[in-house]
Image (cartoon, grey):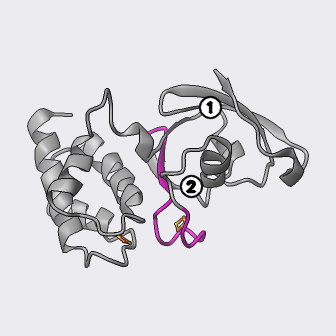
Amino acid sequence: MTVASQDPSTSSPGRRIKLRVNGDEYESEVDPRMTLVDYLREVLGLTATHVGCEHGVCGVCNVLVDGRAVRGCLMLAVQADGREVRTVEGLAEGGKLHPIQEAFIEEHGLQCGFCTGGFMMALCELLESNPNASQEELKEVVGGQLCRCTGYNSIMRAAQNAAAKMGATGS
Ligand code: FES
Ligand code: FES
């Protein structure tokens, strides 16, 4: 288990939390007002989850909590106590990219990449539970996140490609 703590100069009286992130167990004392995305980035150093609007709109902060996609800016770190969190850093396994990551590369599903982790985690929630998701289901997930660069066509192609890969492998 890793003990990771918030900078004490920026915190109010802390709450102790224990959670698993990408398979590793962490125990930390955190400010009860700290959001989950700030905890992941600032305390654990997992900076691939980005922060955009901080209002639950853009989706760049998406992570999986017990397998469900949540906006990390709308959840407090203390609410993740005892939960299993998965971030975009946890997608690749054993040096092999996740099929969703491969699909984004193959279909040029990103430009600046700021939004990409959020799309990947939202698609991960859908496709790992239902690799045979319909076009409408894919569209609903893709339409729930904001991208300022790609125009969405290449992201939809990446989502379709990922669904095909995951449906084929049953992963
Ligand atoms: S930063 Fe969380 S939804 Fe935009
Ligand atoms: S790739 Fe730049 S915001 Fe989506």
Quick check: 89 left or right of 103?
Answer: right
Work out whether residue 51 or residue 86 is closer to the camera in this orientation and state it: 51
Looking at the image, which residue is at 46% across and 63% down?
A: 60
What residue sits right under mark 1 in the picture?
19
Q: Position of residue 84 (x, y in %)?
A: 53, 34
Looking at the image, which residue is at 58% across and 34% down?
A: 83
| Vertical comparison of 157 with 166: above or below | below
Looking at the image, which residue is at 15% across and 55% down?
A: 106
> Where, quadrant-wise, is the C terminus in this rendering?
top left
Mark on residue 72?
2
What is the CA distance from the residue labelled 1 to the residue labelled 2?
15 Å
Q: Position of residue 70 (x, y in %)?
A: 50, 53
* Label 2 near ligand 1 (CB < 8 Å): yes
The kind of secondary structure element at disc 2 is: loop
Name the kind of residue labelled 2 in the image.
Gly
Name the kind of residue labelled 1 in the image.
Leu
Quick check: 94 left or right of 105?
Answer: right
Please tell me how crowded label 1 is: few (under 14), some (14-19), or many (20+) other residues with Cα within 10 Å.
many
Work out whether residue 153 or residue 133 is closer to the camera in this orientation and state it: 153
Q: Position of residue 17 (x, y in %)?
A: 73, 34
Looking at the image, which residue is at 54% across and 69% down?
A: 52
Q: Which residues are magenta?
A: 51-67
Q: Main secondary structure of the magenta part?
A: loop
